[in-house]
Image (cartoon, grey):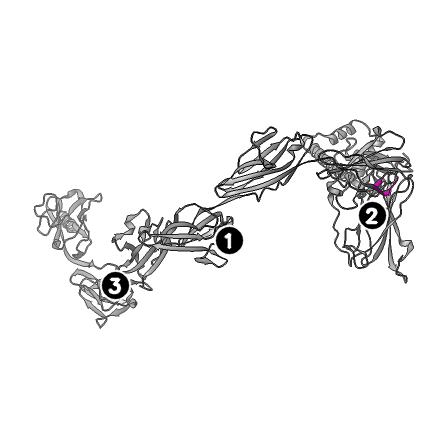
Amino acid sequence: MKPKIGLCFVSLTNAVELVIKPSENVQKKAVGKTLLLTCNLEGGDYSLLSEFEWRDPFNQVINSEMRRVIMPMTTERWADNKLALIIPQMKEEGSGNYTCSGVYAKSQKLTKSVTLQTFVSITWEDAPQEQNAIVNKDFKIKCRVTANPSPVVNWMKNDEPLTTNEHYVIEADGMVIRQVTEADDGYYKCRASVVDTGEIESRSIKVEVFTLPSFESTELIRKEVVEGETINIPCQASGKPPPTYTWIKSNTKQDLSVIGDRYAVNEITGVLTITNLRKEDTGDYICEARNGAGFVTRPVNLLVIVKPTVYEIRNISIPTGKEAKLECRASGYPLPSVTFRKFGLDKPFVQGAQQWDDRIVIEQRYDEQKRETTGTLIISQLSTADDDLYECIAENKGGAARRNGHLTVEYSPTFAHTPMKEAWSWSKRPINLTCLAEAIPNATIRWRLNEQELENWPHFQKYGNGPQSSLLVTPTDSKYYGMYKCVATNTHGTAYHTIRLQEARVPGNILQAKLELATATTVSFILIGPSDVGGLPIKAIVVQYKEHRRPWSEAFNKTWSYESSRTQNAKYILEGLGPQTTYDFRFAAVNEVGIGHWAADFKYTMPKRSSPEEPKILHAYKLDEEGVIQSPFGDRFELRWKIPADNGEIIDRFEVKYCAVIRNEEDQWEPVKESECKTIEHRTNEVSWLELVNLQPDTYYKIELRAHNLIGFSTPNEDVIRTARGTGTFIGPDTSQLSSTLLFAILIGILLLIFIIVDVSCFFVHHAGLLHLLCGKSARKQPREDDTKMTSLYSWRFPLPYCSNKETSPSDSNSNGNNSLTDIDLKRPLPDMNFVFEGKELLNSGHRDAKIHIESSTPMIDNNGKKDTTVQYDIKKSVAKTGFAKDSAV
């Protein structure tokens, strides 16, 4: 039994060991990398393992009490009984043997070692991935790489290997490009490899070739800007990369981008902005464009133009006949030119003498020290026409400045604008005598009567001593009538103006009154006025008339305005007289003094009542050479006339007869067909026009117009018209002449339509209104025949499916064969309706008592003894009445 037990013990002892992972006996690690090694017991009971630890190449237990520390390292016991060795950052001196050891079952020493070999991996020491070259210069692409063992470096561009030649020189720490061109722009690959470690790495380097900024032209740029304005000065250069810009003022060497205030520099676009320009901004400026390749400059000269200012012009006053000099001083930069313009003239004066008036000369002189221009307006041999405002105009590139000066021309008094030369008074009536003395300086005025000075005289009152003066005269006696003299005096002389004051009278007698025309109620006179108007113009003519047997105290008066009747043989018409009545007439003239004596007595017996006078056709259209009226329309003509005198009886109508006519052999107009002549009666005096319609184009028509009263027709007035070719374009009459009846009817129709729309809306929305009331009543009682007819009539225009006479189910209404009115309205087609207009005249002819009838040619109710229904609408009375057509059985 014992030999068997010993054999089993030996077998267990051989199976217990320590295992290190990674399991390679020799492991190579890059410097700077992190290392992890784990040690684990295999084939034994971990609880029997003691003194479990890691040792460094110096056989030191790796823990916090190590005396010699090669590099930071720690050990950790993990939950799965592994002992981990952790080196956070491997160092080159950390190479050597690292041992994991322990004692198993307090008797067996277990160890396991691993050899660590360190190496330096490829490291990019100086190899920027973006590098910039400058065109036409040598450039070295940096690529310094280290490794242990030392690496081998080679270069490529666009995956093509590069070798040293005339353009490229490969060096240990980079590659030199000789005389860089823009073609060298691109991506380069620097590749490092270590054969011993099998490590290879590459780095892509972007090389951007910079070009020096350049301007299209380096010539001096000149800018001129007006003071107070804003200028944007561009500066644009090309280069790679795009340059940034700086502006510098030459005389101060200041960078304008940091001054601020009125200066602003856009570093990207290169625009220099200067606001509120001042004169001191004049000078040279330098634009600097800079990028990685360098910088270039360009000069700009700025000239600030100062707007002109007129700072002095003095008013002058010179007598007539002398020479005037009006001076004007102005400043600005550059110095402005100065001229003058007289108010009322479109153009200013030119330098030197004026061609149209050599008395006027313009001179100017420049003073660079005072920086001013003086302009002088010289006018010799002054006249009053030269007295005016003169505008001084100073101009330069910056604009113009204006200022007014006045040239006053002094002169002796004149009464050129005093129109009063005579005056009239009567019955001790006060009268004002006024004179206006124009003079510079102002004149003083005194008055004389018949060469006697009027100072403190009774019956005289003086108002004003100049330049205007009025003398209030109260002529209580004939001695106050006569020649009054207004005397004006100033430093340059004296002038006189006379006014004759005369006594006015009433006009003389009317010399003659002639009867020109008489009708039954109207007379027309031609009067010959008085030879003596009494000194004042006649204002009116007065006629006094009476029946022959009555006294003049019962006479009537009528006044005609004389102002509107001054033409020779003017007619004076008197209306409203009685037919077959003898009248006495007498006449007088009227002026401001009063009415003259009655004269030119006239006695006349009026004619008896008769037919109207002949109406006069008004020619609204042009006549041709034959005297034919040319209508602008082909199918119509608008006839207009003047209403004649009615001769004692009111005109009740006009009769218009028109026929198509042609000229016969005797050159007379005769109807084409007498049977086709048409006659129209026009029964209104409110509208004196009528439109003839349905005419034939390019046809002659003869029109006869007669007026009619109770006694008979007037004589006809005839005219011939010719219609235009084609149908023409209708131009309706003026709406201001539309019949008031027609306008009233249109208004009533609109109001009725609005009422129906509102009532139907109220029925559906609010269950209210007249329609709702009618429906409510029809539901409570049996319909009457009149109601049924009226409902049927309304259902023609406004079907009312919601308004039935009673509430019945569909089965009830069909079972008894008695359909309700609603059923009939819904099932039957709408009846045909005819609108018939009755009246004496058409509506558009102005008749005021027309009626509208609505007739149904189809029975609107059932055939049970019921017939057609009509509705009459009286436009004048605005009343609608329902009735039944003739022969109705109801």
Looking at numbered disc 3 in the image, what kind of residue is underneath it? Answer: Ala
Measured in 3D between alpha carbons, the distance from the residue under mark 2 to the one under mark 3, in whole angstroms, is 109 Å
Measured in 3D between alpha carbons, the distance from the residue under mark 1 to the one under mark 3, in whole angstroms, is 69 Å
Query: Which residue matches tag 3?
Result: 133
Q: Position of residue 559 (x, y in %)?
A: 77, 36
- In this rendering, would 496 be left or right of 45? right
Q: Which mark is residue 616?
A: 2
Looking at numbered disc 2 in the image, what kind of residue is underneath it? Answer: Lys
Q: How crowded is mark 1: few (under 14 residues within 10 Å), some or many (20 or more)?
A: few
Q: What stretch is highlighted in magenta?
A: 513-524
Q: How crowded is mark 3: few (under 14 residues within 10 Å), some or many (20 or more)?
A: many
- Residue at horizontal 80 percent and vertical 34 percent from the top: 598
Q: What element carries label 3?
A: strand
Principal secondary structure, stretch drawn in magenta:
strand
Is 520 in the magenta?
A: yes
Q: What element carries label 2?
A: strand
Q: Is residue 857 visible?
A: no
Which label's residue is closer to the chain start, 1 or 2? Answer: 1
Image depth: mark 2 or mark 3 in front: 2
- Residue at horizontal 65 percent and vertical 32 percent from the top: 479
Q: Position of residue 857 (x, y in %)?
A: 86, 42
Image depth: mark 1 or mark 2 in front: 1
Query: Which residue matches tag 1?
Result: 346
Q: Are marks 1 and 3 in contact (CB under 8 Å)?
A: no
Decide which of 632, 577 is in the foreground and name it: 577
Looking at numbered disc 1 in the image, what kind of residue is underneath it? Answer: Asp
Q: Is residue 216 above or below residue 821?
A: below
Q: Is mark 1 on a helix, strand or loop?
A: loop
Q: Can residue 497 be seen in this view?
A: yes
